[in-house]
Amino acid sequence: MNQQSSARLHADSIVIDAVCPLARPGSEYLEWYRAGGVTALAPSVETDDIAATLNDLGLWHRLFREREDLLLVRRAADIEAAKQTGRLGIYLHFQGADPIGTNLDLVDFYKALGVGIVQLTYNVKNRVGDGCEERTDAGLSRFGVKLIERLNKARVLVDCSHTGLRTSLDAIECSTAPVVLSHTNAASVHASPRNAPASSPDGRSIHIFIPPPGSVQRQSARCFWHACSSVRSFSRPAAIATASCFASRPDSANRSRNACDS
């Protein structure tokens, strides 16, 4: 593929960055994403405490009001609309469930404000489950089970990035919609607590990972080979996404498009 055809393929494609912690309201990163031809991206909302979360959401909503070139993504069709109209789609993302506290009604509140994806933990243990860097991996808590149910009902995507393996597998088991690992790569390529296996122990879910274009070419090729090999080796449903994966039970494989629609 030559440079011209590659540029055309990129221009015609829907390009999504699944997590963008540096894309802050008013930052130059938003302009860089637009210049790079990105269709939609998921900035990380502040999650240190509820006050910080609400302040951040307020900043984003002011930006949506002031800038016609930005589109708040509430459903899958909004991403297609962003592509068709040349706007930059934004869907808001929590890296950790702390802003929910113990009040599950806040799931619907945040959903109404445009939060479309909630990551269960951020490396360490919380009331939902264990993070990927904990000494133990105790799995999803009772509250975590209730949170998954509420996220499904509100059509908010469940994200298991930075989450312990047992907790992640429990989330996949409990969820009636596909579960996304928005920024995780393959443990078989690089052994790290942040990475995940290519499939669950019982083979019910497949995780395919491809690193972002900025990675070293040789490592990228190795990851791409790993992804293709996984697709060939398993008959279970699988999806490929840049630096991320979709993990689903077989009976929810066709629901990924509707998982975040309101």
Image (cartoon, grey):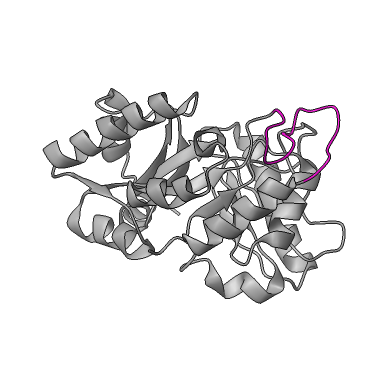
Quadrant of residue 92 within the rendered picture: top left
Residue 176's spot in the image, x, y percent? Answer: 62, 67
Residue 76's spot in the image, x, y percent? Answer: 38, 62
**Quadrant, the N terminus:** bottom left
**Quadrant, the C terminus:** bottom left
Residue at 30% from the left image edge and 60% from the top image edge: 78
Marker count (numbered): 0
Residue 235's spot in the image, x, y percent? Answer: 75, 73
Position of residue 222 relative to residue 26, above or below, is: below
Regarding residue 199, the answer to whether it shows in the image is: yes
Quadrant of residue 179 within the rendered picture: bottom right
Residue 128 highlighted magenta (yes or no):
yes
Residue stretch rendered in magenta on the structure: 124-139
- On the picture, is 64 further left or further right than 37? left
Residue 240's spot in the image, x, y percent? Answer: 59, 57
**Which one is in front, 91 or 88?**
91
**Which one is in front, 243 or 59?**
59
Residue at 56% from the left image edge and 38% from the top image edge: 97
- On the picture, is 218 further left or further right than 153? right
Residue at 34% from the left image edge and 56% from the top image edge: 74
- Dominant SS of magenta comes to loop
Position of residue 65 relative to residue 208, above or below, is: above
Residue at 19% from the left image edge and 34% from the top image edge: 62
Regarding residue 206, the answer to whether it shows in the image is: no
Quadrant of residue 123 within the rendered picture: top right
Position of residue 122 relative to residue 18, above or below, is: above
